[in-house]
Amino acid sequence: EPEVTQTPSHQVTQMGQEVILRCVPISNHLYFYWYRQILGQKVEFLVSFYNNEISEKSEIFDDQFSVERPDGSNFTLKIRSTKLEDSAMYFCASSSSYEQYFGPGTRLTVT
Amino acid sequence: AQKVTQAQTEISVVEKEDVTLDCVYETRDTTYYLFWYKQPPSGELVFLIRRNSFDEQNEISGRYSWNFQKSTSSFNFTITASQVVDSAVYFCALSEALFTSGTYKYIFGTGTRLKVLA
């Protein structure tokens, strides 16, 4: 069964550094998403992406964040200058309609 | 605004007890979708069930069952004869259509941590 994959599973970075989280969505899906879950809290929507552009973004998704589909298979989330409060689990998801399929997540730790 | 409420923050039960996790939602949409996910300590989101707003049939899958009631905007989840392996955080989610873009976003509840004691 096709699945969404994410790399790395765990990323440790220093405050102020740039990080790129990578996702490979299910191949025939057209819609892509990123969600964030701060430890012990709920999962929150960050951004949706369709037809090579951002469709919707939440207030969390500020200028420090960007998304890209550089090669038609990978879907990336970049955080330009990480802050301590960016420490969280980041989930990628893809869909062809209303139902989204989630990747296993990348745990980002900012020290 | 769309909202999902899981009022139970944490529940502890002894193995073999039945346990019900509550989920109440708010939405303006007439067509919507509801989901339950399990999040074990390893952190991934494990899909359990989906329901659309036109299908109010309750569902049973092994030890799991779901009770969807539109009249009370609730979508509750029951585990029968709980086991230690059921210990996890369980999230209820509502799929909201973003009509301006044709995409959807999930709105998650705050989760219920279930501890099943041996």
Image (tube, rainbow, N blue to C red):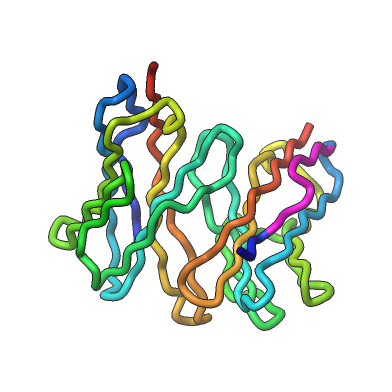
Q: Quadrant of residue A94?
A: bottom right
Picture quarter with the C terminus of chain B:
top left
Q: Where B88 falls versus A104 (above or below)?
A: above
Q: Quadrant of residue B95?
A: bottom left
List x then y, in percent, for residue A57: 58, 66
Q: Is residue A71 left or right of residue B70?
A: right
| Residue at the front extreme, as displayed | B62
List x then y, in percent, for residue B89: 45, 36
List x then y, in percent, for residue B73: 21, 57
- Per the picture, the main secondary structure of the magenta-coloured stretch is strand
Q: What residue is shown at x 32% (from left), y 51% (from top)?
A: B61
| Residue at the top extreme, as displayed | B118
Residue A11 magenta-highlighted = yes
* Magenta stretch in the rendered image: A5-13
Q: Is residue B95 left or right of residue B27?
A: right
Q: What residue is shown at x 13% (from left), y 61% (from top)?
A: B71
Front residue of A110 and B57 = B57
List x then y, in percent, for residue B26: 28, 59
Residue A10 magenta-highlighted = yes
Q: What residue is shown at x 32% (from left), y 63% (from top)?
A: B51
Q: Is residue B15 left or right of residue A47?
A: left
Front residue of A49 and B38 = B38
Q: What residue is shown at x 26% (from left), y 75% (from top)?
A: B30
Q: Where B34 falls versus A39 (above or below)?
A: below
Q: Is residue B114 left or right of residue A8?
A: left
In the rendered picture of this protein, how many numbered marks are placed on residues? Answer: 0
Picture quarter with the N terminus of chain B:
bottom left
Q: Where A41 falls versus B100 (above or below)?
A: above
